[in-house]
Amino acid sequence: MTPIYPPAPRESVVDTVHGRQIPDPYRWLEDAQAAATREWVAAQRVLCESVLDALPGRDALRDRITELHGTGSVTAPVWRGGRQFFTRRLPHQERAVLLTVGASGAERVLIDPMALDPTGNTTLDSWHPDAEGRRLAYKISSGGSEESLLHVLDVATGEVLEGPISGTRHSAITWIPGGDAYFYVRQLPTAGRRIYLHRVGTDADLADVLVFGEGLPDTADFGLLISQDGRWLSVGVASGTENRSDLWLGDLANGPDKPEFRPIQVGVDADTGLYMWRDGRAYFFTDRDAPRSKLCVADPSDLDHTAWLDLVPEAPDAVLTDFAILDGPELDRARLLVTWTRHAVNEITVHDLKTGDLLGTVPTPGVGSVGGLFERPEGGHEAWFSYTDATTPRTILRYDARDATTSVWATAPGLVGVPEVRSSQVSFSSADGTTVRMQVVEPVDRDGPLPAILFGYGGFGSSIVPEYDPSVLAWVEAGGVYAIANVRGGGEEGEEWHRAGMREHKQNVFDDFHAAAQALIDGGWTTPAQLGSYGGSNGGLLVGAALVQRPDLCRTVVCEAPLLDMVRYERFGLGHLWTAEYGTADDPEQLGWLLGYSPYHHVDSGVDYPAVLFTVSDNDSRVDPMHARKMCAALQHASSGSGPILLRAEAEAGHKGRSATRAVSLAADTLAFLAQHTGLKLPNTTLGPRYE
């Protein structure tokens, strides 16, 4: 039964943009502080809660997700000065805690977000130990805002030495050897984002030295990396979130406050990182002339592109994603570890550092995902990395190059009963004949079509790889199928795959998603009446577009923190940084791209739309909740379907970084909603047979 929706007046707002007449009847919902908007959101919250609270099996589902979430988490160690730094979340903890281990082997808590704020609304955004492991720069934010404040503490005593320093949202930090100063990125109202030298203990507003960025656009962002000897500062410069970057190298021979910069790569359509490594060679990690990326080397005396030599060439069917150098005195020769993504699955190969010749592979527990490669900065024979797959919580492994073995360094701290599932990768053809892949997780005893969820993202070159996910396991354990489509726009097949799903090619992403849904149906996993779709952020745009383009393909949609009004997205949140990915409405041709698929502008009256749950957070500073508000109102007005159109608005939360309890609550609400409208019968108690 369709609920009675709060009234939402349709206003006669029509913009003329490049000669196009573009109606916007819910423009008034853009203003979050307006009394009318606040009243409407409050009424939607009451409606949504009343519907979600009545969903059968939701409480039991929440309990089971909580159990599966009880694995906790642990990260690989970052080594500085013989000291380890890593995070761990125990099963009962709301947030991960930053710990350190020194020469004595005793663990000590450095930062516990819950000790800083018992409400759970404070997030540890990032942390950066100095080269000696004596000082730690860290950033925290509150309420999901991601507006980080920078502090520095003494590792030995835990004393906070300085902070807060504002304007450091998503800012890179790199310490100068000795720990007395660091370079960092700061955004000031009068200067935009720039790179500064900061000396610990001085007033950041008065004493910081501007070293790079003057004259660049205010939206420029920077990556920073200093060489181990403190001589070289590598600076990557990107415009917004564009995947292309300029590259500069600063010579600090005359002091960190007087760097002499020279361009290494400027105005080139490529993304390149420069690493002045401890062995005296310059390493270039680049996709220049290599869409799947390659690793090059050069002599620091000649860093011109023509002097780069391929050390690990581009592979024809895998994307190079990371590398680490092992060169300890106990090794007969220095080795290079290289991580690859091959059709959304990771592997690590071992090479001779001098020649690049393949020596072997690093053993891993199965076919899954590898996260990071961490070695000791001063050199050594060990490397640490994480491993996970559909049923394996993130585990930290240690590779020893002396005997080419892998051992477990740390497991997830909590033990849970993980359900038995079957995971496989399938291929299908998109509308233009392109082969697309999809991971399918299903019950081992599946016999015929089942209620299913199709998840996708498809943007910004982000790769969706296998991982342990309590929500996926809880859904499959209850009898459903969960599929993850590696559509174009992501990075699973390299930069060409990304570009095939951005800007004027964005429709490819939606076509891939439609084809994934059809593949699930044709393959017997599900039926249109049993299929739901789910995506967040750019993935929210994906499922929003699929919703209006092919409402017949599924019966329910969860659209989380979505972009949906693509004509006006640049005016809100961080949208102005994303024009390289989507295009800009300021350009007539690009407006045509955007308007061609903008979900909000393709809602038609009288269509039997699926049941939809929009989930947003009041403090989301990346994607403004106005997108979901406007789209929700439009669908509530237009849909002839019987499924509800709901808006779940969460206070004191942002785009990401929820506490454990909040994350579980959101997952339970979304899965219970999907279950209700795909026909999945959830147990009413966690003591049912599937939860033994």
Image (cartoon, rainbow, N blue to C red):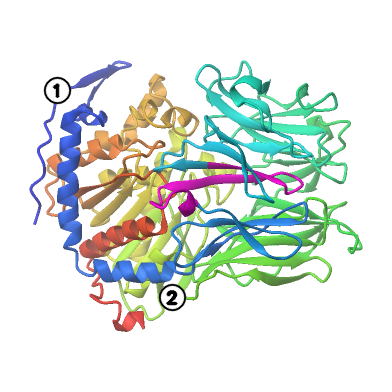
Tell me: residue 441, above or below residue 119.
Answer: below
Q: Residue at x 53, y 51 (%)?
A: 463
Lateral position of residue 627 relative to residue 259, left or right: left
Magenta part of the chain: 113-139
Lateral position of residue 624 relative to residue 230, left or right: left
Asked if residue 136 is among those painted magenta in the image, a careful observer would answer yes
Tell me: residue 153, above or below residue 94.
Answer: above
Secondary structure of the residue carrying tag 1 is loop
The spot of residue 177 in percent (x, y) is 78, 39
Q: Amino acid at mark 1?
A: Ser
Q: Amino acid at mark 2?
A: Val
Nearer the observer, 467 or 346: 467
The spot of residue 4 in percent (x, y) is 7, 48
Q: Residue at x 82, y 62 (%)?
A: 381
Question: In the picture, residue 137 is in which quadrant?
Answer: top right
Mark 2 sits on what residue? 421
Badge 1 crowding class, 10 Å Cα cut-off, few under 14, some 14 to 19, many 20 or more, is few
Counting residues from the start of the chain, the first of labels 1 and 2 encountered is: 1
Q: Residue at x 16, y 49 (%)?
A: 46
Which mark is drawn over residue 58? none
Mark 1 sits on what residue? 12
The spot of residue 173 in percent (x, y) is 64, 37
Is mark 1 in CB contact (under 8 Å) with mark 2?
A: no
Secondary structure of the residue carrying tag 2 is strand
Nearer the observer, 526 or 419: 419
The spot of residue 228 in percent (x, y) is 80, 42
Could you give the CA–CA distance between mark 1 and mark 2, rounded to whole angstroms?
Answer: 52 Å
Asked if residue 126 is among those painted magenta in the image, a careful observer would answer yes
